Amino acid sequence: MNFGYARVGATDQDVKLQHDALIKYVDEENVYVETIGGNKTERPVLDDMMSKLRKGDTVYVWRLDRLGRSLKHLIQLVEYFNERDVGFVSLTEGFDTTTRGGKLVFNVFGAMAEFERNLIQERTVTGLEAARARGRRGGRPFTLTDKQTETLRKMYNSKKHSVAAIARTFGISRPTVYRYVNEDRGNSN
């Protein structure tokens, strides 16, 4: 069975063009029209359509940007279709995963997205290592003054106060109490 998915855009609030293109390939009752903008994460109409998809079905869209919020989201959706043996066709771009050529193009998109994710991860790790080498440390900055830290450590070392009581006194979490107790504050910034 063929399904069509149309969505309004930021500038085009009319789906007539999309609808007219889709009904050439899809029965009108199987055209799903989303009236929520693309940046919204909840898409009830898309979810409804996807719940009806079965092996061998094909999803048609007018343009690729009508389906996914981003390239990453588009790839996730097409991977979802692929895992369930559901075809995907974008009419404007001529993208069709039911053909060998379309599957190749999709795999190139997927490989490029994975490459981009790996580059971002690599840059992040490199940046964190460089910051650590310069004596900088990530995470939330210390909020207690030197005097408060000294008082906290005295309370902890006296063994008269529980960690929970110390945390309540200073308005911090128990792990933060341990961080203040175990770290030399002078080397943390």
Image (cartoon, helix red, strand yellow):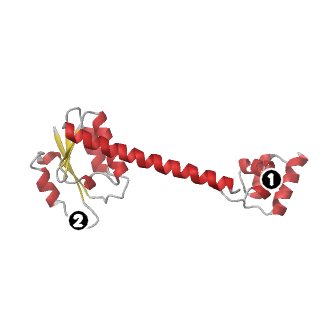
Q: Note whether residue 138 is visible.
A: no
Query: Which kind of residue does numbered mark 2 sit on?
Result: Gln
Residues at circles 2 and 1 in contact by the CB criterion of under 8 Å: no
Which residue is at the front of the view, 181 or 184?
A: 184
Which residue is at the front of the view, 76 or 3?
A: 76
Query: Dot 1: within a 10 Å radius of its alpha carbon, few (fewer than 14), some, or many (20 or more) residues?
Result: few
Residue under the image location 36 percent in, 43 percent down: 111
Image coordinates for residue 73, horizontal then vertical, percent? 35, 49
> Circle 2 is placed at which residue position?
13
Which residue is at the front of the view, 177 or 122?
A: 122
Q: Nearer the viewer, mark 2 or mark 1?
A: 1
Residue under the image location 62 percent in, 50 percent down: 129
Q: Note whether residue 81 is visible.
A: yes
> Circle 1 is placed at which residue position?
184
- Assign the C terminus to one quadrant of the image: bottom right
Query: Which kind of residue does numbered mark 1 sit on?
Result: Asp
Mark 2 or mark 1: which comes first in sequence? Answer: 2
In the image, 169: left or right of 104? Answer: right
Query: Farthest right residue?
Result: 158
Query: Farthest bottom residue?
Result: 11
Residue under the image location 11 percent in, 50 percent down: 23
- Assign the N terminus to one quadrant of the image: top left
Image coordinates for residue 69, horizontal then vertical, percent? 34, 54
Image coordinates for residue 65, horizontal then vertical, percent? 27, 55
Query: Dot 2: within a 10 Å radius of its alpha carbon, few (fewer than 14), some, or many (20 or more) residues?
Result: few
Instruction: Say which mark, if any, is on residue 67.
Output: none
Image coordinates for residue 34, horizontal then vertical, percent? 26, 55
Q: Secondary structure at mark 1?
A: loop
Above or below residue 54? Residue 168 is below
Which residue is at the front of the view, 108 or 91?
A: 108
Residue under the image location 52 percent in, 52 percent down: 123
